[in-house]
Amino acid sequence: MIYRDGITEIVPLEDNEFFRNRFGWYQGWWNDPDVTRFTSHGQYPKSKRELEEYLSINDNADQIVWAILDTTEENHHWIGNVSLQQIDWQNRSAEVAIIIGLTKFNGRGHGTRVLTMVLDHARRKMGLHRVWAGTAQENQGFQKAALRAGMTHEGRERQAMWCDGHWMSIEKFAKVWND
């Protein structure tokens, strides 16, 4: 499924020419400590082989990954990924996660737009009841985007993440649909 709103577009991440031509800087994202600061991805270096295998991730039934494109210029920029992961079909729930690899696009509202699109997909196309996310307490950008997209702050896991040489709490968010 492809979703777009005139500024942001999400398309399935797959092994094709568009993504292959941009693979060098994609590998750079995953090894950039500023990009991966609030994620588990920054704990170990990512090899080219490992990331090439990731391009076939959508063959997995418990995860969907979309590429985030900024469409404000003629040449669309692949700026990050968004995923629904840990899909639990029995309990109709999943985790949503976003990474913006091209940091010059931070603060432009892409996170809110992407979360809104993915939450809509989760409910209307997948029939999920609950989508949740967790982020480091210092990741104010994601927290604002989650609230703007209609997620509710559910609480905090105290000192649950080792980041930048100290413990951080994880802020928990969720969208629950009561049908």
Image: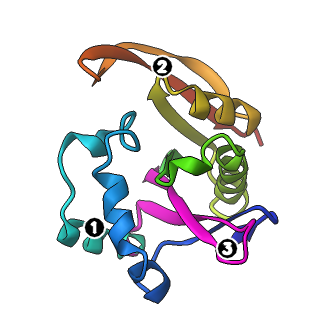
Frontmost residue, 171 versus 70:
70
Instruction: Report which residue position mark 1 lands on.
Output: 51
Q: Residue 2 carries which label?
A: 3
Q: Residue at x 50, y 54 (%)?
A: 102
| Alpha-carbon span between mark 2 and mark 3 | 31 Å
Horizontal placement of 127 versus 163: left or right?
right
Q: Count neighbours of disc 3 (C-alpha within 10 A) and say few if under 14, some if 14 to 19, many if 20 or more.
A: few
Which circle marks residue 137 in the picture?
A: 2
For mark 1, give the secondary structure: helix
Q: How many other residues sit within 10 Å of disc 2, few (<14), some (14-19) or many (≥20)?
A: some
Magenta segment: does it hold 48? no
Amino acid type at circle 1 is Leu
Q: Position of residue 16 (x, y in %)?
A: 44, 87
Specify the quadrant of the image occupied by residue 143. top right
Residue at image position (59%, 68%) is 77
Q: Point out the stretch of residues depicted in magenta.
A: 59-87
Where does the C terminus fall, quadrant-wise? top right
User: What SS does tag 2 mark?
Assistant: loop
Q: What residue type is labelled 3?
A: Ile
The answer to whether residue 60 shows anywhere in this view is yes
Looking at the image, tell me whether mark 2 or mark 3 is earlier in sequence order.
3
Q: Is residue 89 visible?
A: no
